[in-house]
Amino acid sequence: MLLDYLPIFLVLAFSVIVSLAIVFSSRLFGPYRPNKIKNLSYESGKDPVGSTHERISVKYYLVAMLFIIFDIEVIYVYPWAVEFRNMFHSNGLFAFMPMFIFLIVLELGYLYILMKGGLKWD
Amino acid sequence: MEMTNLYQSLNLILPELVLSAVLVILVAADLIYHNNKAPVKFVALSGIVVSFFFLLFNFDNSGFAFTFGNTIRNFGLVTVDNFGHFFKLIVLISSFFVVIFSFSSIELKEAENRIGEYFALIYGMIIGMFFMISASDLILVYLSMELLSLSSYVLAGFLKLRERNSEASLKYLIYGAVSSGLMLFGISILYGMTGSTNLYVINSLIQGPNINLLTLSFALILIFAGIGYKISSAPFHFWTPDVYEGAPVTITAFLSVASKAAGFALLIRFIKTTFVSYTDANGAWNLINVFDWQSVLIAISILTMTLGNFSALWQDNMKRMLAYSSIAHAGYMMLGILVLSNQGLLAVLIYFAFYLLMNLGAFLVVMLIANKIGTEDINSYNGLGYTSPFLSVSLAIFLVSLTGIPPTAGFIGKLYLFIALVDAKMIAVAVIALLNTVVSLYYYIRVLKHMYLIKTEPDTPVIKPNFIETLIVLALAVPVILFGIYFQPVVDFAKSCLVILGM
């Protein structure tokens, strides 16, 4: 049934409405003093127009990669936290164990990066 | 998952757990000991010994770990059986030797402050291989293969300032990425056809009527591309010579023995559990009639050994020559699988036990010589037989054994392979394999010619290994001769390891 997909359409519609509302309300209520730099499209601080054959420091990739590791950590911890109440009821304190081991290993990795100077920018 | 099940499962994979714990300890030890790396090396070596004992204690333990509680047949992600134990022993023994090699490698001295990473990555490889050997679920197969591959990419280029190393690493990475992508595609097709990733469940499902054989063959060839890349069989072998030549010798030795063993274990388990309907009283495996593994394996095996042997004829670099020889040996070992019987499996196990000794030994001697003269060029071996008799004689033993000439272990290995072939009435294949052995004689003996038949010159180096190095060379060379004469214990042991848990 097409009606089963109604929630998805609702979410889509909601996101469209909210984003439009944000864009227009800021124009409506906020001060508006444009200049050339403010009007550039947002590219995380980089100049959006120009040659694509630019060298980017390899350190950037390292930090980006480390960021992904911790991003993934959240992905693992979140479902565990959601399901934790049930696991605690059935398994008691054992429910902590898997996440505990996972976090120890992960934090050890973080410590390793830190002590080996992986996060030093210069 | 129920808790009792979890405890039982963890009990079954104790050696793997020990290895994982040691990996964590290694990383921590690397942080604690900045300057003196001796404790790190000690942890690396003792971790392997400890898990070796755990593996021995676990030897009679077998079963399915991490089963899905709700299915009727409780087949799990991990299958622990004697077949797996055998290959795990091979992997552990070879990693023991490789770790000791690493202590005396001159190449690795230039990266002494990163040696903790080196051992941690070796442990990553070992854990990956352990799970590859006992994986009975396609997801775990893929995951463990990636764990093995990612660690070995880094290790192949461990001496990153050497151009040869980086080249090897990059080539390995590119080939590996392509073949693991192909394999994943094959796995996804197989999953799409059967709706399960478990090998045992797939086994029962592909016997059904609704299987499109063409699609299935396509998926299987793609999966074989992934496994064939790990064992460096013919159409997927192109990375082998370049990587073996460029990587540090210790890693080359490790890749050529342990990584290949894990690949073979995976191939055998994949064929046995997924495509064999039953094993009859004579030990012959009856294939489910969906894919003709036998013809495919015959073709690939002949191609692999012929290509390996004929390319090795022209090599002047020892590591490159041994790389092509290891491709040829992959072809020989496939002979044992294509028979599709317990007898063939026995031959493969025996061959691997001996291959471990002789191949590791050959690489060790090559490393010890390269430590002194800084090159692996065969022409620089001229006259070594007279200035450094001990190493030359050991190298001669290993090379003669790799050829498969009587008083050495290599002969017994080949003998069992050929007997299995003849018993299965595949005379033609056996003859081709025999002719290949004759070809291989040329390039192995050529090294001996350089060492013994070319006169010593005043600048021929004198290579004296120290006490520990001598001990390790002896530990590999003596069994090669000993098992060539008195091989019954190995055969008996291999016979007790034929059990692959199945239907």
Image: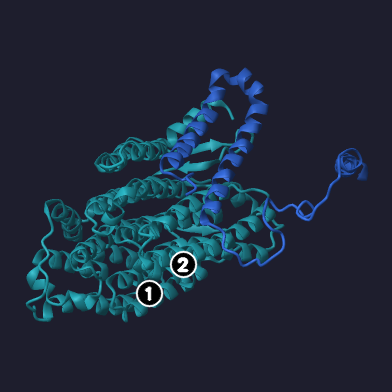
- The answer to whether B229 appears left or right of B89 in the picture is right
- The answer to whether B301 appears left or right of A36 in the picture is left
Q: Which residue is mark 1?
A: B308
Label 2 vs label 1: CA separation?
19 Å
| Chain seen in cyan | B
Residue lying at 14% horizontally and 52% vertically, measured from the top left: B471
Q: Quadrant of residue B444?
A: bottom left
Q: Tell me which label, 2 or 1, sits earlier in the chain.
A: 2
Chain label for disc 1: B
Q: Which residue is mark 2?
A: B171
- Estimate the x, y position of residue B333 in percent, counting from the top left: 38, 64
- Can see residue B47? yes
Relative vertical location of residue B293 with respect to residue A102 in this rendering, above or below: below
Determine the secondary structure under disc 2.
Answer: helix
Picture colour for chain A = blue
Same chain for the residues under marks 2 and 1 in the image: yes
Residue lying at 39% horizontally and 49% vertically, measured from the top left: B121
**Badge 2 amino acid:** Lys
